[in-house]
Amino acid sequence: MNPILIAEFCQNHNGRWELVERMVEEAAAAGADYAKLQTIRSRELTHRPRFDEGEFYPDGRVKTIKRPYEAELKRLSALDLSLEQEAKFIELCRQAGIRSMTTVFTRSGVQDVKELGYDAIKIASYDCASYPLLRDVKAVWGKIFVSTGATFDEEIEKAAEVLSGADYEFLHCVTIYPTPLEEVHLRRMEWLRRFTPRVGFSDHSKPSETGLWASKAALAFGASCIERHFTVLAPDETRDGPVSVNPEQLRELRAFAERPREERLEILKRDFPAWEVMLGDAHRPLSEQELLNRDYYRGRFASKVDGKVIYNWE
């Protein structure tokens, strides 16, 4: 079976429906297996005052990143898609011959979209250890993808226990945006195969600087799927543009993924002599940047019920 390619639309549609339509068409034509939205609801953004100005240690090191709530709420509000638009997205995917997926960020979000007909669901890295959320999606979807970046080993082990019996894939990723090749740590995929035979890679490297080598190396080492942020605009026209691939690059990945695995590895070693820099370690401490990102993004969104904030791990 050829590896799965996931075209992650993320925020690259800029809240414009005509871009969503174009992205579905282009992703399908380039050979993606899934087109993926993010079920972000700006109203579920949580206000945590310590991030409004950021915090520093006495020695000047960053303690918490700065992300003012009001500015982030305004930005995200312009990107909101309605349930009606998500349903239309699913139908567009069917018509284009590509499967549909979304990332859910809250437990209430699961309830919102569970009847829409998505072919699969994705859990973002920062919710890999949100076990109640995992249980919710396990009860609804037959196919689940879970990113494992910014998650501790023992949390991943517990997530695997929660997901036992489900059709799920772990995706190795590194939550540094963009990810340098020396921080890719592809050896971690082998450790993740202890829990499920299908382990993929969610790639946040920067194509303009490192090409597609991180994704190609992951494919050479047996990744079951590759998730890439996808754009039909110039890299500087969207927030996630610099770490996104365009249709031509996605088509290149499709062609590479369809080669026999032995041939992928041969090409990697021949055309990228420094390939071993991407192997890294199966077990490693999270970097300072990853810990800062975990601190902010874990709990960034939460369900709000009767005026009460309910985090995904509660």
Image (spheres, rainbow, N blue to C red):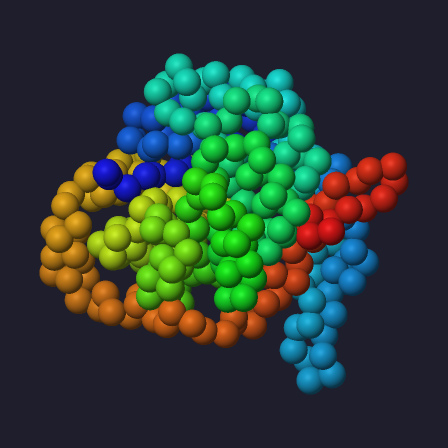
The answer to which quarter of the image holds residue 183 is bottom left
Q: Position of residue 36 (x, y in %)?
A: 47, 34
Instruction: Name the spot of residue 212 as percent of width and height, x first.
Output: 29, 51
Q: Judge whether 215 appears above or below 55 on screen.
A: above
**Spot occupied by residue 129 in the image (x, y as percentages of width and height):** 59, 56
Return the x and y of residue 253 as percentages of the image width and height: 26, 42
* Residue 170 visible in the current orientation: yes
Q: Residue at x 33, y 33 (%)?
A: 32
Q: Please name the residue shown 54% across and 66% down the image.
A: 154
Residue lying furthest front: 165
**Horizontal side of residue 280 vs 63, given as left or right:** left
**Residue at 57% across / 21% down in the picture?**
116
**Residue 280 occupies which quadrant of the picture?**
bottom left
Q: Nearer the viewer, residue 232 or 25?
A: 25
Instruction: Decide which of 39, 213 is in the foreground and name it.
Output: 39
- Seen from the viewer's position, the closer of residues 238 and 81 is 81
Q: Nearer the viewer, residue 164 or 214?
A: 164
**Compared with residue 231, is residue 222 higher up or lower down, i.e. above or below?**
below
Above or below: residue 244 compared with residue 289: above
* Side (left or right) of 115 relative to 223: right
Instruction: Kindly identify the residue that appears in the image at 62 percent across and 51 percent down.
Output: 131
